[in-house]
Image (tube, rainbow, N blue to C red):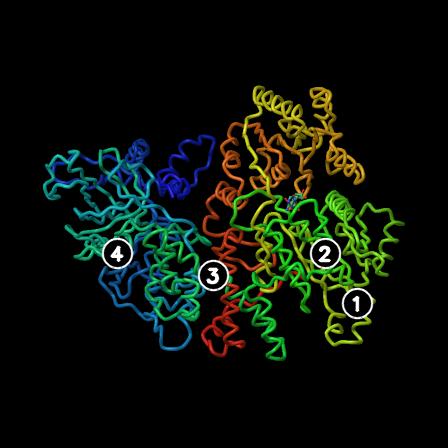
Amino acid sequence: MSNLYVSVFMDNDGVEKLEEYRMSPGRLVPDTKHFVDEIDIALSCTRFPCITLGNSPLVELYGGVLYEEAEMNLLASKTGREYRYSGNVVFTEHENSEERPLLESTHSDATFSASDEMNLHLLSYPSVPFSSDSGEPKPFTEKSISKPAEISSDSESILDKPIKFLPGLSSRCCRQLENSGFHTVRKLLHHFPRTYADLQNSRDAIDDGQYLIFVGTVLASRGIKASISFSFVEVLVGCEFADGNHNFDDSNKDHSSKQNRIVYLHLKKYFRGTRFTNQSFLRSLQSKYKEGDHVCVSGKVKKLQTEDHYEMREYSIDILDEDGGSNPHAERRPYPLYPAKAGLKPGFLRDIISRALKVVERDIDPIPRMVLSEFNLVDLRDAYIGIHHPRDLDEADSARRRLIFDDFFYLQLGRLFQMLEALGTQIEKEDLLDKYRRQGLNTISNDDWCALTRKFLEALPYSLTPSQLDAASEIIWDLKRPVPMNRLLQRSYWYSGDVGCGKTVVAFLACMEVIGSGFQAAFMVPTELLATQHYEHLLSLLENIKDVDKPSIAILTGSTASKQSRIIRQGLQSGEIDMVIGTHSLIAEKVEFSALRIAVVDEQQRFGVIQRGRFNSKQLYYASEASKINAKESDESANRLYMAPHILAMSATPIPRTLALALYGDMTLTQITDLPPGRLPIDTHVLQSDEGGLENVYKMMLEELHDGGKVYLVYPIIDESEQLPQLRAAAAEFESISDRFNGYQCGLLHGRMKSDEKDHTLQQFRSGEVRILLSTQVIEIGVDVPDASMMVVMNAERFGISQLHQLRGRVGRGERKSRCVLLSSTASSVARLKVLEKSCDGFYLANADLILRGPGNLLGKKQSGHLPEFPIARLEIDGSILQEAHLAALSVLGTSNDLQSFPRLRAELSMRQPLCLLGD
Ligand SMILES: Nc1ncnc2c1ncn2[C@@H]1O[C@H](COP(=O)(O)OP(=O)(O)OP(=O)(O)O)[C@@H](O)[C@H]1O
């Protein structure tokens, strides 16, 4: 992680806020609080310049910005009371008696504000408290500071102890933490860093805003009362960057020498409130770091005007042991950056979390050792330390993996545990576990497929790829089981490739198997366009079949005429129709099946969970005539009579919701890991759509058309918009494109067209009658015209990266070399879009999208709706951990169905939040 990147997102310090105020003359009423904050700092900086040593040059102040203000402030303070800030005293008398400023804070904010106040209550326990009245140390009362946790006295894990069990927290501080949702130690430890700053050793150039790490020697320290209610502490640390020996005491030494460069760090903390101007308080802070102490400092640097002098207001400082070891930042560790939460500042949270880590015992891990070693997981305590105080990014990564594993594991465990509990006999339990174990091995050879399926396979115009065959065998194995299948078919997470891996034919094979066994199939797609495409595709494949009865196939969508629709419904109810392809009309109340055995849900993420569930919950399944007869003959068939249909969901882009469904333990994954042969990578170009750019693209289109290709022109809108004049519109450009490409027929496709018009246009494009198809993003989902060879996306900046990737997948589906041109109307978007030139890996692009959209999600991505929240898992890339967690849960439950052999695991499971079940 580059420093540049990190620094962009850090809080500004007070000086910048002042500048902001100065630069906005239109602002009539200043934000008095900030104003006063800044004035206080400016004032103190002016009246108390940085520590200087011997006769070394005066250390000048922050980048000049403050001079003017500071001088003005100083004058003001000399002439009147304007800046004698007295109103905002932090503690009331009552509070004083209960809570005291304590001395070991490493809080990281420049000035002391309401929430910083708590930082001062954080002490390593015990410490020396101060009375506000006398300045004399006064013993803590039980009321003021909690005792060190009596952690391991009972069986409850420290993780689930209330936050007050952390040593040294004042009751006020506990309250604040609780109000912000940190009720337990676990909640606190699960507040993960949003990213890490890469602490650089600063031998090279030191730039403003960098997070750096230094090892040096304390040269001086002072605590200053700057005004009646404002104080600060400054520690001066000298760091030598050279091989020679430099004596810090020798202040006359030429410190600018290239060989013996010394960098001076002025660590400053500011306090507001009369209580903190107390001399004893300031003296004790001052004496905390003594001259000659060997220290490690890490944090954000700000250049001062004097060469080699830097100010740090956000920092951590640790006194190094004699041997220089055992301090968290000494070894250039990644520096955790936390998100603020409910008003609690990141620096404060960092302190409390460090404190919590110290009380976590070694033996807190409920997951059995055997599972940890089998899946190569770090111990839970190490994971907490690794995520909060990693030695390096690899350690953070292992920690993250372990914590994600936990999220997935307990969900899987809970779900499977519930399912096992519901079963009566041991045999049933074993059978269930068996179903989920080693899914990859559960395949059925195509010799054992039914005759219809085999004939269908033989009649295909191409051979299936090995992974298509494996996927079909795996699914057909499931179809032969007496337990309803709930399976997701998608392309593999891990291979780099585009969409179009050939799922449809695999699903067709599954449907054939069911039909060949005397049942019915339903195939639900999100758009009418796709329904027609699949319907026609299937009919064309069936045409080649010989020597078996061909199944009867129907199409049912919202546009099907009502008379036709009634006939189809009757056919489904009577069993005359074997398979229906359609949109969500298939799950309408009045659609009944005679013997529905499989429901395929294509592009399933487009359907709500509830819609998909309708296949399960409604009276869609009745036994076929054949199975009714069989039912009388065997118990097994009798069970089948009442079985819910198998569900085969398909997704081109696995998305979080999809994977979350998979988390529920009863949805299994089948992955296609290769592409049909002969596919060539798509050449992608990102261009700006100025005059020249557009002309170039039109030239490329013409070449493509001359060569016999077909072109998609994708527009963000249908008609021109007055509000967004920069956007090109499909309908508006139809004429001009037709004129320009005279001799090549153009077609128009968009969402406002009637269904049959859309089908007709797509059909024309497919047949080659239309060579240029102007469309909106309606083609994004599933449209398959294998010989379409070029796509131009207008105003590409209006689309998300993943969406563009999905659109681009409409070309390159055949053996012809294809290209995709993304035209951006703004120069600034070109860089963002360039990522598509480099990669055609959907997961990589989803990630890039996430990072481009902002750093807030670097470590975590929250889910919405009914789904559980995974604080750090990124479901689109953590699929392999999900699989491992699934196997681990099976392994544990295989050893002990009721978890009696793993009491801690059982306890942990019950501690975790109740499983949240999906919408329906
Ligand atoms: N084994 C194969 N060999 C050659 N072509 C194939 C093979 N399997 C599928 N195809 C063809 O590849 C194209 C893409 O297949 P399909 O539409 O099933 O992909 P998909 O996985 O559903 O893609 P998407 O999710 O992007 O729509 C189709 O034209 C299909 O006929």
Quadrant of the rendering where the N terminus is positioned: top left
Q: Amino acid at mark 2?
A: Thr
Residue 427, given in percent of the width and then of the height, sits at 61, 78
Question: SS of the residue at dot 1?
Answer: loop
| Image side of residue 110 versus residue 256, left or right | right
Residue at x 36%, y 77% (from the top left corner): 153
Vertical arrangement, residue 623 with respect to residue 854, above or below: below
Q: Is mark 2 within 8 Å of ligand 1?
A: no
Give how far across and how far down residue 570 sits, in percent: 87, 57
Marked residue nearer the N-terminal end (1 or 2):
2
Q: Residue at x 48, y 43 (%)?
A: 851
Ranked by sequence position, the earlier of labels 3 and 1 is: 3
Which marked residue is nearer to the observer: mark 3 or mark 4? 3
Number of the front mark, 4 or 1 = 1
Q: How far apart, in angstroms, are the residues tagged by discs 3 and 2?
A: 39 Å
Helix, strand, or loop for circle 2?
A: helix
Separation of marks 3 and 4 at Cα, in angstroms = 29 Å
Q: Nearer the viewer, mark 1 or mark 2?
A: 2
Q: Which residue is mark 2?
A: 453
Figure check: 765 above or below 889:
above
Tag shown at residue 327: 4
Instruction: Say whether disc 3 or disc 4 marks the residue closer to the N-terminus.
Output: 4
